[in-house]
Amino acid sequence: MKLPSELSTLFERDLDKLSEELNSYENDEDIWTVNGEIKNSAGNLFLHLCGNLKHFIGATLNKTGYERDREFEFAGKVSKEDLAENILETKEMLASYFERVSVDDMSDPYPLQPFGYPMTKSQFILHLYGHFNYHMGQINYHRRLLET
């Protein structure tokens, strides 16, 4: 099993898809639109996805020193260029982590217990991957709703 390599490939592919979603917004202001039942803008979901990975993999496992501002992820606003840079930084951080981690490392306990129970690194990273794609689907849906 080559789990770190496989995870790296999947995250890289899907971060590229996230960049495509960002670039698919024809109007930059639409990235920050909320309406009715849509409580989170795509822009805030972009910030959240990158912040989540930079915190739980970058700071916690890769010791990057990243300090998360979760409140800003859901309330802040930055330029489209800053969002693109954030995605690129996240992609580079993940590549750095996965190129140095071994298959054996993945069965070690994840050092935090955000859900109140222990998980292995591989379990938690798989959870993060699912979380990432859940929100990426919301971003895709948000963009397509605004196109109609």
Image (cartoon, rainbow, N blue to C red):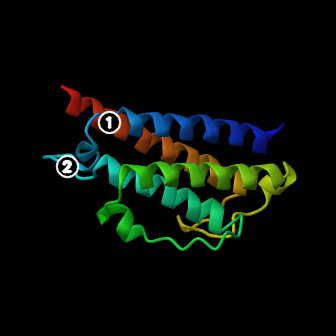
The percent position of residue 110, horizontal first and vertical second, equals: 69, 63
- Badge 2, how many Cα within 10 Å: few under 14, some, many 20+? few
Left of 119 or right of it: where is 67?
left
When asked about the image quadrant of residue 141, the answer is top left
Q: Which mark is residue 117?
A: none
Q: Residue at x 79, y 54 (%)?
A: 107
- The amino acid marked with disc number 1 is Tyr
The percent position of residue 75, horizontal first and vertical second, equals: 29, 65
Q: Residue at x 71, y 57 (%)?
A: 120
Left of 73 or right of it: where is 142?
left
Q: Secondary structure at mark 2?
A: loop
Q: Quadrant of the C terminus?
A: top left
Above/below status of 144 relative to 44: above
Q: Residue at x 34, y 51 (%)?
A: 43
The percent position of residue 77, horizontal first and vertical second, equals: 31, 61
Q: Residue at x 60, y 34 (%)?
A: 13
Tell me the CA gap for discs 2 and 1. Answer: 14 Å
Which circle, 2 or 1, is nearer the viewer?
1
Q: Nearer the viewer, residue 73 or 2?
A: 73
Above/below status of 19 relative to 50: above
- The extreme top residue here reads 148
Q: Secondary structure at mark 1?
A: loop
Q: Which residue is mark 1?
A: 25
**In the rendered image, is residue 121 in sight?**
yes
Above/below status of 116 relative to 134: below
The percent position of residue 38, horizontal first and vertical second, equals: 21, 46
Q: Nearer the viewer, residue 5 or 119?
A: 5
**In the rendered image, is residue 101 in sight?**
no
Q: Nearer the viewer, residue 24 or 127?
A: 24
- The amino acid marked with disc number 2 is Val
Q: Which residue is mark 2?
A: 34
- Badge 1, how many Cα within 10 Å: few under 14, some, many 20+? some
